Image: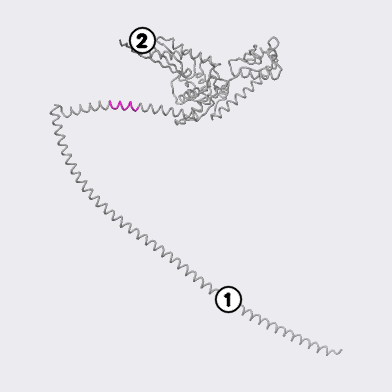
Amino acid sequence: MDNPLYYGIASVVGFILAVVLIKTIDYLRLKDADKQAKEMIQLAQRDIDARRREADLEIKEAAIQQRADGERELSKIREELHERQRMIDKREDTLDQSMEQLRKQERMVENNQLRLAERIEEADRHNEELTQITESQQKKLHDLSGLSKEAATTQLLSMLDEQLKHETGARILAHEKNLTETCEEKSREILITSLQRYAATHVADTTTNTVDIPNDEMKGRIIGREGRNIRAFEKATGCDVIIDDTPGVVIVSGFDMVRREVARRALEKLIADGRIHPARIEEIVEETQAEQDVYLKKVAQEAVQEVDVSGLHAKVVELLGRLRFRTSYSQNVLRHSIEVAFLSGMMAEELGLDGALARRCGLLHDIGKAADHEAEGGHPKIGADLLKRYGEGPEVVHAALGHHDDIRIEYPYTVLVAAADACSAGRPGARRENLDHYIKRMEELESIANSFSGVTQAFAIRAGRELRVLVSAKDTSDESAARVCRDIAKAYEDQLTYPGEIKVTVLRETRITEIAR
């Protein structure tokens, strides 16, 4: 066992066995690989055959689909061709009918032309006959009248001219009458529409002149020692304080209503505070004056915004606020101005004018009443001067100056403001007077009319806006009655102050009486 030869043989045999084993393994591996390759080739062949069959199916399906699409397209084309053929046939039928109708119309036109030619010939014959008859009649007329053709033509034209003048005058008068009626109707329509569109407050505001006090002891404290408190109060406010035996009230009197309002509010504060002495009075009055200025500015700005007017001068706004405490026949002037502004704007828009400018004219037309106690003249002139000074336009200035018809009207806005002013003042309940003053004014109107010669009776009607005067038929004639009417109206203008206008109507009646015996 320990023989080296044995180990050598065993090694060679082991090597040979290993080589044989390796070769056998390689053979087996090659055989398996070959087998796998054949199987893979078979699988690939089957896959190729399946894919070939699928491709053939897809090709057949695509061919079938293309054939179906082609048949559908062909069917569609055939339908379109059939539709076009039907349309062509229909058009051919329509053309045939049109041609037939056209031939009928041509035959009718030919017949009409023949008849028209015959009538023209007949008319020509009639014209020739009429011309001959006219010439013969003209010749007879010339022979009978002894006038030549030119003279007869001249005479006839003159007669026609006179007739046309008369007819033209009558037509002009008729058109003028219709135009006047139309203008009056349109004016009434515009006024009524504007009044209906703007519903203003009819009840007038009032400004109180009395201040309530808790007890009569407060009167003594208001007067002060030797009257120093009341003197200081009157000096600071510019108003008079009237303290009498009337229980529970103190009267504040003053011409300037703004100052009077400041005095009233200051006195109420002093009474509520209880500390009444000259220094406290001056302090309260200054404080109240500052509050009043702020209040007036606020009121004016609210009015300006309500009317939608912009660009007013600060001084004009201040004067506008002062109108809050100014009244005319118990009608608040600021509310009256706002109402006039709205009415003027509405009427201007109805007429195609500038509504914003009309509202501006209406709002500022009575601005002179805020300063009429500080300057001489009537409020129209004062207002016009103020508006011109503070840069307002000529339309606004003219509206303030002429809204009472005192000047020649240059702008249409002045007429609109005057009409709106009369409408605002004439609303039922807009202005009111106490009974005594009302009766006194009526009696004054009637007494002035009765003072004229020939007047027998005078009656004031419509709250003093119209006067009916009866004159004697014996003492007056129609001409003198007209003169009396004019003189009465002039006397009212010179002697009285009144809002709006007063219509004077004079009636003269002639009576003839006979007695049958």
The secondary element bearing badge 2 is classed as: loop
Judged left or right of residue 42, residue 182 is left
Q: For the magenta stretch, what is the residue range?
A: 166-175
Tag 1 or tag 2, which sits nearer the N-term? 1
Q: Quadrant of residue 100?
A: bottom left
- The circle on residue 4 is none
Q: Amino acid at mark 1?
A: Ala
Establish if 126 lies above or below 169: below
Give the colouring mode of the picture.
one colour
Q: CA distance from mark 2 to mark 1?
A: 144 Å
Farthest right residue? 2
Establish if 92 lies above or below 310: below
Q: Position of residue 2 (x, y in %)?
A: 87, 89
Dominant SS of magenta comes to: helix
The secondary element bearing badge 1 is classed as: helix
Q: Residue at x 36, y 10 (%)?
A: 474
- The circle on residue 50 is 1
Q: Nearer the viewer, residue 327 or 381?
A: 327
Q: Position of residue 464 (x, y in %)?
A: 47, 17
Judged left or right of residue 491, residue 368 is right
Q: Amino acid at mark 2?
A: Lys
Judged left or right of residue 8, residue 464 is left
Q: Nearer the viewer, residue 466 or 490?
A: 466
Q: Quadrant of residue 189?
A: top left
Farthest front residue? 517
User: Which image quadrant: the C terminus?
Assistant: top left
Label 2: which residue? 474
* Eye-nearest disc, 2 or 1: 2
Q: Position of residue 162 (x, y in %)?
A: 25, 25
Q: Residue at x 28, y 27 (%)?
A: 167
- Discs 2, 1 touching: Cβ within 8 Å: no
